[in-house]
Amino acid sequence: MSFDRSIKIAPSILSADFANFGQEIQAIESQGADWVHIDVMDGHFVPNLTFGPMAVKAFRPHVKTVMDVHLMIAPVDPYIDAYADAGADVLTAHIEAGPHIHRTLQAIRAAGMKAGVALNPGTPAEAVAHLLDLTDLICVMTVNPGFGGQKFIDMTSKIRSLRSMIGDRPVHIEIDGGVDPSTAPLVAEAGADVLVAGSAVFKGGSVNDPDVYGANIRNIRDTANGVWA
């Protein structure tokens, strides 16, 4: 993975057709997705259950871009090697999920993946001030984690604080929750460069009508870049 700060759209397959993941992944990539975002939930750290390492490993052959795995689980450390084996390119852990986030980030990198740290809406930017040299990505939650389709929570001041703290470090700022053409420009202007979008990408389309995915992705990207139709 080479680093750049251009806007990247990372569709969350939590909003895809669960019976057809392989073709859904191929469809969004063919229609311009930059990354593929996979939300892992454990029914403990968040009130939902989604994918485990075996499912993520099954997704891997279909992902030709970047497989971005977001762990909404606790604890994290016992599962790092399993997600590395599953083929994650980026593995993100929540700072709230355990007491030893330095150890977690070090272990993710040691397993050969890029290390991400996620912040819930109630967690301040300052919580990661001492992690910036251990981190490749900071994920700012703009909903409370656990379910797709929630209303966007404005975290632009937090994003601006992070962008200032990061300086010239090669660290992505990712936004997860409620991203659509109306919110994308707000977070992009504040300094975000990876935009996770679920329902805003998948709504209205299917593997049989993938052009809708492409139109949705382009609309989010264009508005994030300040281009309005």
Image (cartoon, grey):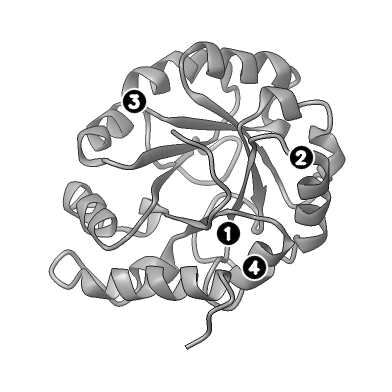
Look at discs 2 and 3 and give the one toward the viewer. Answer: 2
The kind of secondary structure element at disc 1 is loop
Per the image, the residue denoted by label 3 is 87
Mark found first going from the N terminus, 4 or 3 = 3
The kind of secondary structure element at disc 3 is loop
Look at discs 4 and 2 and give the one toward the viewer. Answer: 2
Look at discs 4 and 3 and give the one toward the viewer. Answer: 3
The amino acid type found where label 2 is placed reads Ile
Mark found first going from the N terminus, 1 or 3 = 3
The amino acid type found where label 1 is placed reads Gly
165 on left or right of 139: right
Q: Is residue 186 above or below residue 102?
A: below
Mark found first going from the N terminus, 2 or 1 = 2
Distance in Å between CA atoms under marks 4 and 1: 6 Å
* Residue under the image location 21 percent in, 41 percent down: 62
Mark 4 and 1 residues: CB-CB less than 8 Å, in contact? Answer: yes
Per the image, the residue denoted by label 2 is 166
Which percent across, then down, holds residue 145?
Answer: 60, 50
Q: Is residue 132 above or below residue 49?
A: above
Mark 2 and 3 residues: CB-CB less than 8 Å, in contact? Answer: no
The amino acid type found where label 3 is placed reads Gly
Mark found first going from the N terminus, 2 or 3 = 3
Mark found first going from the N terminus, 4 or 2 = 4
Per the image, the residue denoted by label 4 is 152
Q: Residues within 10 Å of mark 3 (few under 14, many from 20)?
A: many
Per the image, the residue denoted by label 1 is 177
